[in-house]
Amino acid sequence: MATVEELFGINVFNDSVMRQRLPKETYKALHKTIDEGRRLDPEVASVVANAMKDWALERGATHYTHWFQPLNSVTAEKHDAFISPMPGGAIIQEFSGKELVRGEADASSLPNGGLRSTFEARGYTAWDPTSYAFIKDHILCIPTAYCSWGGEALDKKTPLLRSMEALNRQAVRILHLFGRLDATRVTPTVGPEQEYFLVDKDLFDRRSDLIFSGRTLFGAKPPKGQELGDHFFGTIQTRVQAFMADLNEELWKLGVLAKTEHNETAPAQHEMAPIYAVASVACDHNQITMEMMKKVALRHNLVCLLAEKPFEGVNGSGKHNNWSMFTNTGYNLLDPGDSPHESAQFLCFLAAVIKAVDENQDLLRASVASAGNDHRLGGCEAPPAIISIFLGDELTEILEALEAGAAYSGREKTDMTVGVHALPKFPRDTTDRNRTSPFAFTGNKFEFRSLGSSASVSDANVVLNTIVAESLRQFADELETAEDFRKTLHDLIVRTIHDHKRIIFNGNNYSAEWVEEAARRGLLNLPSTVDALPCYTAEKNIRLFETHRVLSETELRSRRDIGLDSYAKMINIEAETMLMMARRQILPAVLKYAGALASSVNAVRAADLSLACGNPLVSSLCAGIDALNDCIGLLSDTLSAKPAAEAPEEAARYMHDKVLPVMAALRAAADRLETVTDREIWPFPTYDELLFSIQ
Ligand code: ADP
Ligand code: MG
């Protein structure tokens, strides 16, 4: 059996393969493109394409694809064989530089939010040489960006790359002010922890709700949920362990640094965390991870659920986006460090993040908005829809002392003047971790915990990179013209703390008091996707994204509309699925049971045992059936009354305000019946089976 070292990256056209297989000059030229964003010479592209093809053929590939990330949060691929006809009926296998660099995808069915009409369906894919090509199922996958004829981004990759550039430009300006002239590039790093559920495929196949929406739309609570806390970090079930081993192997082959695996809080819930990587690569790798989780699960007769809230009553799944910034010289800009010099720089970057989060709560909330995630956020198990920052007591005290111009009376007595005196050392492994915060400082990085488990990490990181770039831009503008750099810096940091400290909250984010307190502080509370997504096109946000050349107004509008449109469509699918299950499965089953119950009661009565049982049973069941039937009628009417051909925002609003509450009522009626109906007659597997059957 191959060792992990032998397996790792075996299906990736990575740097060492390139070094081995490319002529020196080509390798150097390609690196200039990768490292410095230089334009790629067509001749270089031809040589790379040929080397890539030879390598792929040796590894059994037959096709290539431009692998991209359209605006619906999945990945798209269209396969082309390498074959070319030869005289005499033979073929050769070819792959040109042109085919590597650019593809034309007639992808008219992919969402574009009005950026293209179907008669102008041309979209272009352009090779992103910063992310390695890889082989998946005999297909050479070339990571690409996807844009329209007019150059508008139709994907999640392009704005991510642009936002990384924006952050780089501004962060380097700041570093140069600190005299770090060797720092020529700053890159955001991301480590996304991925949560997921596994259910048995035989059970899954019997539930239309799981099949169509990825989450249960019905299901009464089982006697046991997660209350004993016996699943989190518990011994991993044998079948799950076999899945995890297989998953790791597949991910390692694809160069994904799969590192941590464990059982999560809810029964049947698990997590995988990779070692962090450059944001764009982490984003590609997370897409690959989600795909592999689904594929590998099937090999074990399991289904991997990535929906944010597959089950009521137990925790849902999120994706924790650990984020930091590194220089090309290897410094983590969010590492507090030991020396005063580094501390001043650290405080400057920290202040930039605090300001960015406070000023752009709306964008951060919008970046994690989806129908699925709405069920999770604020569910007393995931951060609320209110964005705030957890800094920990020590760092908070330091900032407070700075603002007050007072001596810091923490572990070490230090006069807090930035850049003159040392910051006390931070405990690297902060003991006071707060798992309820949406945006937590965890020693040398921030952890943005509000992302949904099925989302691409792109949206959140596009926002993070851009808003921090904007803070840094304002800082750099002020500092570059300062006569006394140290004093201006000190004042700037103190002013920033003063202006933005309302965003810092170290308490329990799940509590009802926080909702009130946050309102007093004037923090935004955008409970649903319908409240959040329209923020993308607020005046301030258009200006922000255009200033940093990350997204144009048209591109923002398309993203907002696609998000709202998917939201409305998702809820429509769920409502239709509920109607189907309620009418064709639940109602017939319960009627059958009511009939059986009634005749049993009659039989018992005929035998003159009527004292022991009686009509209340039958009548309460009949009342339940009536209630169910009423809800079916109501949901059906509400769906039919959906206004036709409305704007995405109106459609989403209707689904949220009118349809969701009726869905909840229908569910409640059905769940009540489930608890009093013969188990043998209930038409699909119940929560206890779904959550506890995997050993
Ligand atoms: P926990 O569950 O305690 O939050 P994990 O170990 O599961 O921690 O995940 C932490 C994640 O943060 C990992 O993916 C790790 O690689 C990532 N990470 C660590 N340092 C950085 C950093 N500087 N930038 C981005 N991500 C980081
Ligand atoms: Mg975490």
Image (spheres, grey):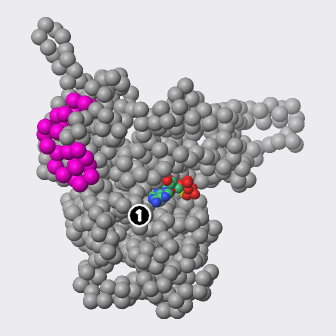
**Badge 1 residue CB within 8 Å of ligand 1:** no
Comparing 407 with 545, the one in front is 407
The amino acid pointed to by label 1 is Tyr
Q: Which residues are magenta?
A: 28-52
| In the image: residue 115, left or right of residue 460 | left
Residue name at image x 58 percent, y 77 percent: 393
Position above or below: 278 against 504: above
The quarter of the rendered structure image containing the N terminus is top right
Q: Position of residue 134 (x, y in %)?
A: 35, 35
In the rendered image, which residue does mark 1 sit on? 331
Position above or below: 418 against 46: below
Q: Is residue 104 magenta?
A: no
Instruction: Specify the farthest residue to the front.
Output: 24
Residue 613's quadrant in the figure? top right
Report if residue 538 is visible in the image.
no
Q: Is residue 49 magenta?
A: yes
Q: Position of residue 267 (x, y in %)?
A: 65, 46
Report if residue 281 is visible in the image.
yes
Instruction: Specify the farthest residue to the bottom.
Output: 405
| In the image: residue 179, left or right of residue 555 | right
Q: Position of residue 552 (x, y in %)?
A: 21, 61
